[in-house]
Amino acid sequence: MSTVRKHYGKWQCLVRVKDHPQIIRSFKLREDAKRWGNETELKIRREDAGIAKIKYPTFNEIGLRYIADVSSTKRGFINERNIIKSLLREAWSTYPINKITADVIGKFRDKQLKTITGTSINRKLDVISTIFTTCKKEWGYPVANPVLSIRRPKKSGARDRRLTDRELNLLIKGNHTNEMMRTIMQIMLETAMRPGEVIRISHDHLKGSTLFIPIAKTKPRTIPLTEKGLALIKNAKLPFITTVDAVGKKFAKLCHHYKIKDAVIYDIRHNALTDFMRVKNLDLQSTMMIAGHSDPRMLMSTYSNLQVEHVAEKLKLIRVDGKKLN
């Protein structure tokens, strides 16, 4: 049904039809608002442009199908499934997919921006976009991708959180940390591997002082090991019987117990890579090989984290005319 009301000096018409998003438009004249409302409601009910010939599933139905047929085959299945399940709790998930417009997704984006970062919202928008692309290209539904018609939120700045020596000491040596988590964190600190890479290694992947990483974020790679890193892996009980999600949750619980704020498991990798450059004096190319990055800008913008005082210390070593700078 359509409803006309006075709103900020204009006449606003609201069109509400079951299983359709609400449509609102304002007019100077009440008659125009009422006429537009009747026409719009009639157009929706008649399903113009042949839409009535196709019975579109709801986003909820499509989301569940996507989890079963597509997402379950991916390596990052758990994270994507969790995102989709959160989307299925939205009110618009009950709409037929052809009724989920750019306006609907835009309002979803704006609501999300009040509670989470732009980067997190973009992950959700990526999943929505992929689902609509699959609907059109593989499942034969002639629907427009609403994500392509909205403005994306700005990405959050790269994390530059570095765990202090005190925090690392608590996390690794604290009596609340079990042996598996202690070993995983120590290996990450010595190798700069991601948690998902660490839990998949085995003793068979060792060759001399190098480690083959068969399942990485982009492609398999081989990294050199420090003496401590080699010893940690040799003495570890491999493979680790856990998941990336479980490791992340256990790390969060440890941080809560030890009162460590604003830290995630990936910050250990951050520490390791900055130490490779700052403490072990590795060049950028060597650190990239260990990190598994193909673009040096990724390493420089995210992991260098070289503080001004450390640069100042290096400048003290510069000599001019044989004299040390003061």
Image: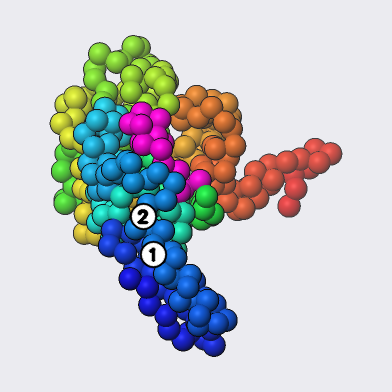
292 lies left or right of 283? left
Q: Quadrant of residue 75?
A: top left
Q: Residue at x 38, y 64 (%)?
A: 41
Marker disc for residue 46: 2
Q: Secondary structure at mark 1?
A: helix
Q: Is residue 118 above or below residue 188?
A: below
The residue type indicated by label 2 comes to: Arg
Q: Quadrant of residue 214?
A: top left
Q: Secondary structure at mark 2?
A: helix
- Front-most of 173 and 26? 26
Residue 140 lies in the magenta-colored region: yes
Q: Position of residue 100 (x, y in %)?
A: 38, 52
Residue 234 lies in the magenta-colored region: no
Residue 231 shows in this picture: yes
Provide the residue span drawn in magenta.
Answer: 133-148
Label located before the other in sequence (2 or 1): 1
Give how far apart the Cα atoms at labels 2 and 1 are: 9 Å
Q: Are marks 2 and 1 in contact (CB under 8 Å)?
A: no
Outermost residue to the right: 321
Marker disc for residue 41: 1
Q: Residue at x 31, y 50 (%)?
A: 96
Quadrant (top left, top right, bottom left, bottom right) of the N terminus: bottom left
Marker disc for residue 220: none
Q: Residue at x 47, y 73 (%)?
A: 35
Q: What number of labels is visible?
A: 2
Q: Residue at x 34, y 46 (%)?
A: 52
Residue 165 shows in this picture: no
Q: Position of residue 289 (x, y in %)?
A: 50, 24
Binning the other alpha carbons within 10 Å of mark 2 as few (below 14), some (14 to 19) or many (20 upward) gives: few
The residue type indicated by label 1 comes to: Glu
- Front-most of 70 and 29? 29
Q: Position of residue 174 (x, y in %)?
A: 21, 51
